[in-house]
Image (cartoon, rainbow, N blue to C red):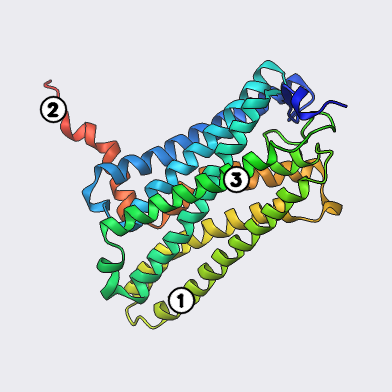
Amino acid sequence: MPNSSSISQFLLLPLADTRQLQLLHLWLFLGISLAALLGNGLIISAVACDHHLHTPMHFFLLNLSLTDLGTICTIVPKAMHNSLWDTRAISYTGCAAQLFFLFFLMGTEFSLLTIMCYDRYVAICKPLHYGTLLGSRACAHMAAAAWASGFLYSLLHTANTFSLPLCQGNALSQFFCEIPQILKLSCSHSYFREIGLLLLSACLTSGCFIFIAFSYVQIFRAVLRIRSEQGRHKAFSTCLPHLAVVSLFLSTAVFAYLKPPSISSPSLDLALSVLYAVVPPVLNPLIYSLRNKELKDSMRGLFNQDFQLSPPTSQ
């Protein structure tokens, strides 16, 4: 059996057995990529260009869109390449890079979602202290901390995973490089170190989830005390999209990594990986823009700007 020093590439899970289905998956991933690029690109452009959106909430939303774009660009292009050229191979270095960037971006995204919950908590429960607690410098520091924590989190997992000896072949039961699938190839008890790191990650994630849940209990209690119906609607319109994004991202990711081995199957693993890694970057811009009037108006302005600036043609 080969060990890790002799492995030069991994074989990813093919998404289909027939050429027609491979091309169908190619077009499907292309559509997903374009939708994610368009939605997140519009949010980034709107927040960057419209000074009315230079608020802490939209600043963190811009950072969230950057992580979503990075996640799509990390996973989907290789899957499209394999479907187009009918191949399964990914180099050892390419697999390590894909795993690193995926964990880096997902770790950063969850940190940003936690920070965005704190932003909503302060805005609704402590509005008089909002400018002090979430000034421009504080927001920059929190965003930098989110990116730095994602980097360190990913570096730790990637270095530990690829230091394990591998002797169970090189075929992964997933269409991208994922830690549980690589651990299945290990022939050493050292993989318990990575399992321990995953459990530690689960504990940290649980802590963030408890913080988010506690914050939303306080938020909803404060919102229900608002006498104005318009005020309650505005508060819910900024909180519910965030809660929906957190629920989708966290539930699918935690279940994918911590589900019992007895219920594991290639089809279930594939479905869960699409739900936590591919679907959120497409849905997040839609969820946030649907109930955010300021963001929708700014996006509409981006489309209409060229028509407003161009002089009418003479007849």
Left or right: 97 in relation to 227: right
- Which residue is found at the position 63% from the left and 39% from the top? 159
Image position, residue 140 (x, y; %): 32, 52
Q: What's the amino acid at mark 1?
A: Phe
Q: Which residue is mark 3?
A: 156
- Which residue is found at the position 61% from the left and 65% from the top? 206
The answer to whether 20 is drawn above or below residue 241 in the figure is above
Q: Which residue is mark 1?
A: 220
Q: CA distance from mark 1 to mark 3?
A: 37 Å
Q: Secondary structure at mark 2?
A: loop
Q: CA distance from mark 3 to mark 2?
A: 56 Å
Q: What's the amino acid at mark 3?
A: Leu
Neighbor class of circle 1 (other Cα within 10 Å; few <14, some 14-19, many 20+) is some
Q: CA distance from mark 1 to mark 2?
A: 49 Å
Q: Which residue is mark 2?
A: 311
Neighbor class of circle 2 (other Cα within 10 Å; few <14, some 14-19, many 20+) is few
Asked whether 33 or 187 is in front, the reply is 187
Badge 1 or badge 2: first in the primary sequence: 1
Neighbor class of circle 3 (other Cα within 10 Å; few <14, some 14-19, many 20+) is some
